[in-house]
Image (tube, rainbow, N blue to C red):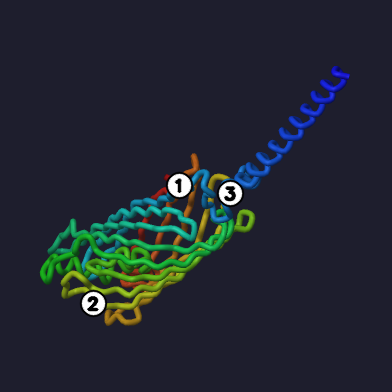
Amino acid sequence: MTKFRSLHVLITLSIYVSVSVSLSSSLCSSESSAKVRPSDINHPTDHLGLGRGYAPPSALFDAGLWGGVGGADDPYQSRSQTGFFFNIRSPFESGELGLSWGMFSHSYENLVDDESGVYTANIAIDWRWRGGERELHDPFIGLGISMPTRSLSGEGGLEGEAQLDAYRIALASRFGGQNRWLWEPNTASAFLEMGGRSTWSHFILQGDLGAAYMYRVIESTEIESANVFVQASGALGFQGALSGLLIGGGYALTPTSLVEDIDQLHAQATYSYLRNDVEYYVSLFVPIDAPAGILGDQMGATALIGARGEM
């Protein structure tokens, strides 16, 4: 009897331990599945490309160099511009914060004068709300401000002429007036942007609308005190595994300006090449209806070389 009683106790303890271990394993499994879902393991980012606490997405950058030339016309035989811009965007849960900086140098030459090294620089900060998947459909709306970090100075004389030319002629024609808040000398702006990019198979369609209130904050007799500015641009094309091509253009208007030419129109073509997760691109801007555009019997063009990707 003692032997059977001991065996009975041993079996009972074994069953108790087995049940306890099973329950403990079940509870641990439930807790771990509640903390880390299989979908989070397979897809550690959401549909906006934002991290779920495992690996926050990297900041995005876009940087480029550009240069433009203009044909002979009165009173200048030639004009040229060179510039640089850098843009970084840091993703957050509800959107992204952007910082942009641009600088250009303007030169011109006529039969008497030769001026070079007249340059200016602006900085812009903006916030964008995004509403789609970055790789497929990427609509956005954003607000921002910009301000000059260096004045394009000179009142009258040679330097003042260069300022007037850079403001009314060369700058306006280079990019069809696009993103004027980043290139407008001596001026602070508050701007609104909206747009997006959609991809269907290898077909791409993108566009944007923008508006800005620009106010002169550095004294100038050549640049108007305040202006309202609007712009629109669009492009379509194809994107392959390694390269893509976009063709489009843009239109810009300054309805409150008192200068002779208040609107700009340009055509644009962009070729891109993807290598090691960095996209390299070359863009060509051709002004059509601008103070130094084709319709004005003057030739001007700008080439832009840049790269964008994750930092």
- Check disc 1 and give the amino acid type: Ser
Label 3 sits on a secondary structure element that is loop
Circle 2 is placed at which residue position? 224
The C terminus lies in quadrant: top left
Query: Where is residue 67, by image quadrant?
Result: bottom left
Q: Nearer the viewer, residue 32 or 183?
A: 32
Circle 3 is placed at which residue position? 240
- Residue 89: x, y in percent? 41, 54
Q: Nearer the viewer, residue 105 or 211?
A: 211
Q: CA distance from mark 2 to mark 3?
A: 45 Å
Residue at the far left: name it: 157
Query: Of label 2 and label 3, which has the lower sequence position?
Result: 2
- Check disc 3 and give the amino acid type: Gly
Q: Is residue 188 left or right of residue 61?
A: left
Residue in view at x 18 percent, y 57 percent? 116
Label 2 sits on a secondary structure element that is loop
- Residue 91: x, y in percent? 45, 54
Query: Where is residue 203, by image quadrant?
Result: bottom right
Q: Nearer the viewer, mark 2 or mark 3?
A: 2
Label 1 sits on a secondary structure element that is loop
Circle 1 is placed at which residue position? 58
Say if mark 1 contacts mark 3, CB within 8 Å: no
